[in-house]
Amino acid sequence: MKLNDQSLNQLFLEARTYSGWQDKEVPDSLLEEVYELAKMGPTAANCVPMRILFIKTKSAKERLKPLLDAGNVDKTMAAPVTAIIAYDLKFYERLDVLYPMVNAKSWFVGREDYIQETAFRNASLQGAYFILAARTCGLDCGPMSGFNNAEVDKEFFKNTSWRSNFLINLGYGDVEKVKPRLPRLTFEEVAKII
């Protein structure tokens, strides 16, 4: 069944990337609700490599601040929450539970390039699910790159198998600070049916 116009507007047509934020707290329970939706999207062999670190406290924001590109500092410091969307390079250790039909772990052991490729691709996909889940739950999003991945990994994921992918500022957007929507390419410009 196709979603109604209100749902399509909330998820896509009227949804925007926010840079300005209302001073309104995002409860931890809502972040958990967003994750519970996002985790249901498909990944290869149900590998679910996305990991998330939610930056909410002033002290955590101060740790992140010097790792951001200059153009991303103000909007990130103003956002109630910044999610570091990461991927776990040891995701395959859980495949015995997540994909028990075969010994899927054996597909990855000792294959570092394949691990990296699978983790990055599928965590990116999960990050997109996360954005849609956040919008479904009434949150606005400001996804972005524009930070030093290596330094973020050193600061927040040292001695772990997690690696940063991208950031999503989360909260309730300030519509007064939304810029006009930029153009998108047409179907004919990007697709072929053969």
Image (cartoon, rainbow, N blue to C red):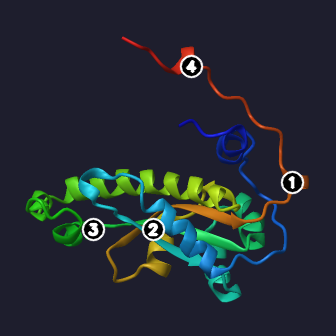
Give the image location of residue 180, x and y in percent: 83, 39
Residue depicted at x 86% and y 54%: 175
Disc 3 residue type (three-letter): Phe
Q: Is residue 97 above or below residue 115?
A: below
Residue depicted at x 71% and y 38%: 5
Disc 4 residue type (three-letter): Phe
Which residue is label 3 attached to? 91
Give the camera-side residue of 169 and 12.
12
Give the image location of residue 1, x and y in percent: 53, 37
**Residue 187 numbered mark, or none:** 4
The residues tagged by marks 2 and 3 sit, at their Cα atoms, a distance apart of 20 Å
Give the image location of residue 163, x and y in percent: 40, 68
If you read the primary sequence from the N terminus, does the residue marked by circle 1 or circle 4 appear first?
1
**Left or right: 37 as drawn, with respect to 14:** left
**Left or right: 146 as drawn, with respect to 17:** left
**Residue 150 numbered mark, or none:** 2
Disc 1 residue type (three-letter): Val
Disc 2 residue type (three-letter): Ala
User: Callout 1: helix, strand or loop?
Assistant: helix
